[in-house]
Image (tube, rainbow, N blue to C red):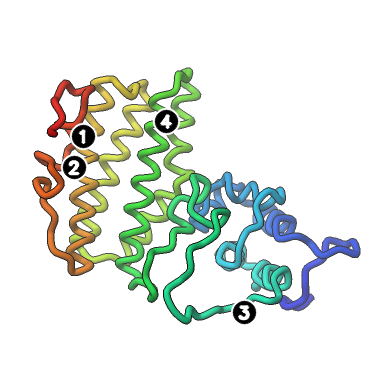
Amino acid sequence: MAVTDPPRDGTEHPESLGECLRRHRQAANLSLADLARRVNYSRGYLSKVETGRAPGNLALARRCDQALATGGALAALMRHASPAAPPDPAPAGPPARAPASDRPTADRPGAETALPTSAPLPPGLASGVAFMLALDATHGALRRVAGDDLSPPRRYDAANRAVHDAALYVAREQLLVSATVPVVAAGEAAFLRLIAIRDAIRTGAALASPEYHAVYHPFAESLWTFRMALRQAFGQEPVTPALLDRIDWSDRERCADCGAVARR
């Protein structure tokens, strides 16, 4: 079967993207989690595509084709499903706002994020922004775990899932190989402090506990430092904490749990 032919499942009906994806994934002996790490989409979103609860898209199809060595079968199927759309559209101007169903969600943190620019970012800058979004998404997921009343085994597993489902490790690898040295250094510092939050939550730290805040505030400071490194890489002027009505980047003065009084 040529890759330009719509794949079929042995019946008169063409395979759906999800059916074809599952067939190739299982043939490659990969779990959903394995594939999610390779294509920078969450395991939950891939599951929805395979079961027909999410439509997928051409970008996902291409990534899965590469990860699964399908010879382009998934992208070809996606094009057959949407024949009116050109295979490689070139933007004629600033991109229109995506419909709600295509906007970034918790299922696809960072992977589907489109920046408001008429031209693609250089790889080093794009990987920096993607990693910043992945850090933020992972921290949000970890906060939810820390706020839940879970048994120790479930808490441990949930904290691990929060990191993997946000595709944090994939985003980190992309940053390490493409960004400038200052951006890599700042990003790695933020990553290590986020992993310290994960470790604290895995061992029982609750959201309002001193153990959580002992690791949260260093992360908050390092995340802001990473943002400022990205600003410098973009050629933007530096932003100081005072400019945003803060004492520093650690968030301590705004934290009621740490007993500090927020600045007004």
Say which residue appears at 27% left-offset and 43% top-offset: 192
Q: Which residue is mark 2?
A: 221
Do the residues under discs 2 and 1 have CB atoms within 8 angstroms? yes
Say which residue appears at 42% left-offset and 37% top-offset: 141
Name the side, left or right, on which 1 lies relative to 108.
right
Q: Which residue is mark 3?
A: 86
Few, some or many C-alpha atoms within 10 Å of disc 4 (few <14, some 14-19, many ≥20)? Answer: some
**Label of residue 144 in the image:** 4
Quarter of the rendering containing residue 155: top left
Amino acid identity at mark 4? Arg
Residue 70 shows up from this direction: yes
Label 2 to label 1, Cα distance in Å?
6 Å
Do the residues under discs 1 and 3 have CB atoms within 8 angstroms? no
Question: Which badge, 4 or 2, is on the more N-terminal residue?
Answer: 4
Residue 38 shows up from this direction: no
Of 5 and 56, nearer the camera is: 56
Label 3 to label 2, Cα distance in Å?
44 Å
